[in-house]
Amino acid sequence: MTRKQLVSSFLALFICGLTFAQKPSKPNASEIYNSIKKLNFLGSVLYVAAHPDDENTRLISYFANEVHARTAYLSLTRGDGGQNLIGPEIRELLGVIRTQELLTAREIDGGEQFFSRANDFGYSKHPDETLAIWNKKDVLNDVVLAIRQFKPDIIINRFDHRSPGSTHGHHTSSAMLSVEAFDLTNNQSQFPDQLEATSVWQPKRLFFNTSWWFYGSEEKFEKADKSGMMGFDIGTYYPTLGLSNSEIASLSRSQHKSQGFGNTGTRGSQMEYVELIKGDMPKNGDIFEGINTTWSRVKGGEVIGDILEEVERNFDFTNPSASIPQLLEAYKLIQKLEDAHWKTLKTAEIKDIIAACSGLYLEAVSSDQHATAGETVQLNIEIINRSNEPIKLVAYETNNHKVSKNVSLQNNEKLEYKESLAIGTNQQPTTPYWLTKKGSLGMYNVENPDLIGKPETPRKFNVSFDLEIENTAISFQKAVVYKMNDPVKGEVYKPFEIVPEAAAKIDEKVLIFNTDQEMEIPVTVTSGKNNLEASVTIAHPRDWNIYPESQNVHIDYKGESKTIFFKVIPPKNESEGLMTPIIKVGDHTYTKELIEIDYEHIPYQTVLLPSETKVVRLNIQKMGQNIGYIEGAGDIVPESLRQIGYEVITISPEDITEETLHRFDAIVVGVRAYNTIENLKYKQDILFDFVSNGGNMIVQYNTSHRLVTDNIAPFSIHLSRDRVTDENAKVSFIDKEHALLNYPNKISEKDFEGWTQERGLYFPDSWDKEFTPILEMHDKGESKKKGSLLVAKYGQGYYIYTGLSFFREFPAGVSGAYRLFANMLSIGKTNIQKQTSLND
Ligand SMILES: [Zn+2]
């Protein structure tokens, strides 16, 4: 077991009542003791920000593990708009990964996790824009709902609601909505529909988690007036865990692997500050001042507190089961509480503690990882009591099928039962609930209001165990799981999932046809059951053709895939549209693609999304044929250029020599190459000589900070943070006659339609007079930006710098982006490579 796994299982118990992890928690005495301390603290903190990774894990861990408060992070989005450093998933699939990374992070730092329906649609400069693209009222509804459900005493915002425009618009919006919600949550007339399932709530205080970053420098922050702030030394060491608070925080932060946020823990004293925004300032340095955080907070709780304080005081680390009689006494009193909120929370916590103290292990493992509607799987049920407590298994229940047992569980004697689990014929497949209906640019579409805010889809199949512990009836619920032995990893747990009978996908998400030549495309069909008999057709735009029209597929075993081939015949003229494989199995039709997300740091996930491939017929003229590609931070530009008929060879920085460059018509530099490839600074002279000798060189965007060299172009150029985030921002041509806009393809306004996410980023804001700016564009309310596409003649060749987001537009099949890029590669060349086109 690595240290990370060790810690993650150490802390797993802190997430009482949640069942997102498939691995069973196996708490030891120290963990049980910490859970008892948490059981005896009745206060809570809600941390609010916009994205996975915005949260301050040091503070979350401090409140969860040092203060023992119930602590949660409300991330308004799931981070769909970010970049993925560990795999090909982007957009909604990246959102699924980052959701699970947050859950794994919370499992380590002891927090809980919530979301809103807001979608991370990409970079936004201002909260006005953010709140126009999000449905402000709906996101505010979700923030109010999260507060009413979680009932925090303290809210802490990551961002400052008073500084719009100084950071990502999502960030400021998260703080603005949190501040606005603070004054609404206790008002019956606000969002009254919520009050059917929850109740009004007034948090006591709201803070902003400030730091030197918001002041520009550590010196400035040191000098700042801190009379409205509270400071905490969050550098605590936890002897029962053998870790410092910031070591836990780093382990938690390091779960953001898709972001590359690996983080090294520190030890020793460290301060965190919060600035009071709403409510009164505590005078005694206790953020919970004036809030009763003991059991006497709840009507009828005092006597429970007395018992549980004794449990905490007398806890025997060598025999936790000694606490069970008193825990049961407290459990029975908790069942009598009138306050439903505390009763639910504390019941879940104390049940987990009782189970842990008695070494009780309950598990229901499915024979199959996947099943389809109408199928029956076998369950293996394991029950064992590892204490001398008198525990009786009264019954267990799987899906309304109750089996009475009435057997005593003797110390360390395992009981195992086999059961069948029948999946209903109407059972919907497992998939993230926020992705089942098509949403808008800014919002997920969630039809069932009970699901709003939940981190993931609740597990459908559970087994409940009715026990009697010392004659006290307690029932426990466990989600059905799948486990297997991996020869390398050992025991591997996976969620038990429902899949459709069949799913199909065209392997490529975008198919570009630059001629009218037909192309054979693979379609992968995956079966969810044994002995699949299906027929497959492909829905396509009217002017395209597919041959054959239909194919039959037989697949013997569930989980198996087969690839079949269809011929796609593009039209003569430029055209684009969507193709979808349609599978018929008996009377059922399936049009979704089944995507598996399988990384070691998060639980395995299946996601169903509409199975769609964009097909684009282009008539691109191009000059020059051989392209050398220097990869930067990673993009699929080389594949995209191959699709329109270029020969593209990827060259590593070490291979940049005069001889290797000689064979190329153009060199293209991948995104952020000058941020990530140290070696490039030694290769610039060779690259510029290549240009001077008649080659073309195209450099795509780099961030303006942390460049490996100042010498990125043969003439001076200054990168800025200028960006145009509105993908529909109007694009004007500075010189309509310029070659880049005319040869070999005539570029028009139409070529800037259908762009995705943004126009571009990190545009230069000043440049040598040798450069000619080609395009002008700007976001609403901003000055005109001319630096998106700059070209300079250098010797016999051309150097082009562009911050336009070709790396986003190519994978989305945006035809205008391909046409413009072909012109960039063709500039100064004369040997036109004629494509089969209308003119032939
Ligand atoms: Zn963020």
Image: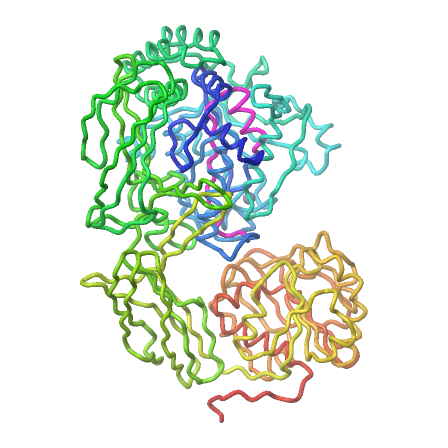
Task: Give the left or right position of residue 225, taking residue 304 as reference.
Answer: right
**Residue name at image x 56 percent, y 16 percent:** 286
Residue lying farthest to the front in this orientation: 413
Vertical order, 268 against 759 (above or below) = above
Vertical order, 667 against 411 (above or below) = below
> Does the magenta segment cover residue 744?
no
Res. 231 visible in picture: no
Task: Give the left or right position of residue 105, taking residue 426 as reference.
Answer: right
**Residue name at image x 62 percent, y 62 percent:** 784
Residue 319 percent location from the top left of the image = 45, 13
> Does the magenta segment cover residue 77?
yes
Res. 428 visible in picture: yes
Between 475 and 648, the residue placed more toward the observer is 475
Residue 80 percent location from the top left of the image = 48, 51
Task: Give the left or right position of residue 571, taking residue 689 as reference.
Answer: left
User: In this picture, which residue range is highlighted in magenta?
Assistant: 57-82
